[in-house]
Amino acid sequence: MKSRAPRHFYPFRQAALAILASLLFLAPATAFAEDAASSKTLWMASAEVGIGPIGEDVFLHLTPGVTALRPMPLFRCDGSGDECRVLSRLSLHVPLRLRIADGEPETGEVFRREDWHEASDFFRILRRLEYGTFDDPIHLRAGELHSATLGQGTIVGGYYNVITTDHYRLGLQADVEEERWGSELLVNDLTNPNLVGLRAHAKLPYLYDEDHDWRQFTLGASAVTDFTAPTSLVLDEDQSTAAGPDLRPAVQQRQATTLAGADLRWRAIGGESGSLTPYVDFNHHFDIGSGIHSGVLWRQNIGHDIRLTSRLEYRHLRDRYLPHYFDPLYEVTRYQHPPLDDPDLPGPKLTAAASAEPSTRHGGYGEVQARIKEDLTLFAAYSDGSGTTPVDLRLRADYELRERARVGLFYYRAVHGDLDFGDTMAELFDLDGALGAVEARATLWRHIYAHGQFARMWRLHDDGDFESVHLFNIGVGAGATF
């Protein structure tokens, strides 16, 4: 398989164009010159140093960066003042890894070549470009995708576009939410996209009065395509997988695979203190089958400090259909997925799913999230099902002691195969094969802080197989605002 990077590629020019476009994004528009006084940009500069291993080598991590925050006009807003402004954010950084311990096999290189070997790697300089927030009518974000979803997440459920140590992707998420309609867009890599998802929804119907019950119904439609989904890998003489020239498994055949769906939601109960919303999703994967997801979303506010949300879902799966096909591990399992029915057929996810015996299966999904004040967020989700339906567990936590410390955690593990309950629970908490991260930051003195990161990611081994690796980075940093 050929490398994705063109032979005559000018990476620094591409990165410079990305930065220039970002700066133009934050530049004040002439039409809003009269609001210049209220559009002052807040600049934050930082520099971090840390030390930690990647595989058999140990690296010194140097990360200088700068962030700009600026209020910007909200498009399609009929009001005035702050209600028609959203916050935009531009974060640039240059993550450098200098090798200070060269393990076997020795490379003799100071800079880690895998960090800057293809076109998309140079866009890691653009750490984050964002217009608005999740609560605004318009929200756009470019950068790494973290737990991305479309709609209820039955097709794209918690997708991460960067889970390997040797590849970076500049993803895009866009969300527009108007009074009567909305849309969502997901692109996994703006430099060379292969996974694109689109969803649109509208309140039905428009012909009824403003206070009619039918206005609580929302109809949506989704379509997600992986245009280059691998179906077979290159095998060597020992029938083992082979590594390609771009630090990915060598692919023999690819094809486009598409999932489409329609969904209906009904806000049965709604108010400031809570809401209850039943929903049903009808999804079809054109290569492996279809599924129906029916459930209920519940939200409850307890006073001003506690917000609870939960979701319970029943799944009716036909043929070889897999729920939330584009899950957190997809960027690895699209190449190498655990076998489902036939243990002699490990390989790409699409091939593994197609090799399963078609059947009608049942499953369930449940999640709960609690947000206490603005400081602590806890999230847990579990899904299970009959037959070849995988079991997976998701955990997230975030705690912030304002201006002093912050701790974040994420964990995801999927288990395949017919195991009893005890073995399944043991596998779910086995780090081998799990995607996880823990990050912490604490102020030491004024603008100086300590930071630490632990991550469980994947790296392609020389024999063409992915192996999970631990990443550590512990150090100090300093930041200033001006």
Image: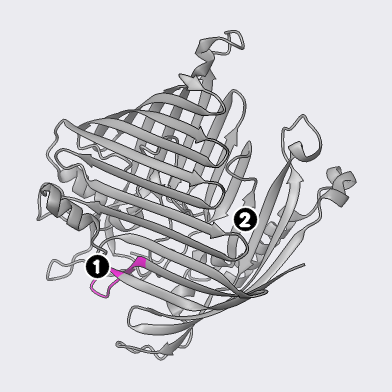
Residue in the image at 36% along x and 61% along y: 436
Residue in the image at 45% along x and 19% along y: 268
Which region of the structure is painted magenta? 456-468
Q: Seen from this angle, which residue lies furthest front?
A: 303
Mark closer to the chain start, 1 or 2: 2
- Residue 347 showing in the rendered view: no
Give left or right: position of 320 versus 335: left
Q: Is residue 466 magenta?
A: yes
Tag 1 near tag 2, CB within 8 Å: no
Q: Which residue is mark 2?
A: 129
Residue in the image at 62% along x and 25% along y: 179
Q: Position of residue 247 (x, y in %)?
A: 35, 70
User: Coloring scheme of the render?
Assistant: one colour
- Residue 163 showing in the rendered view: yes
Quadrant, the C terminus:
bottom right
Q: Which residue is mark 1?
A: 465
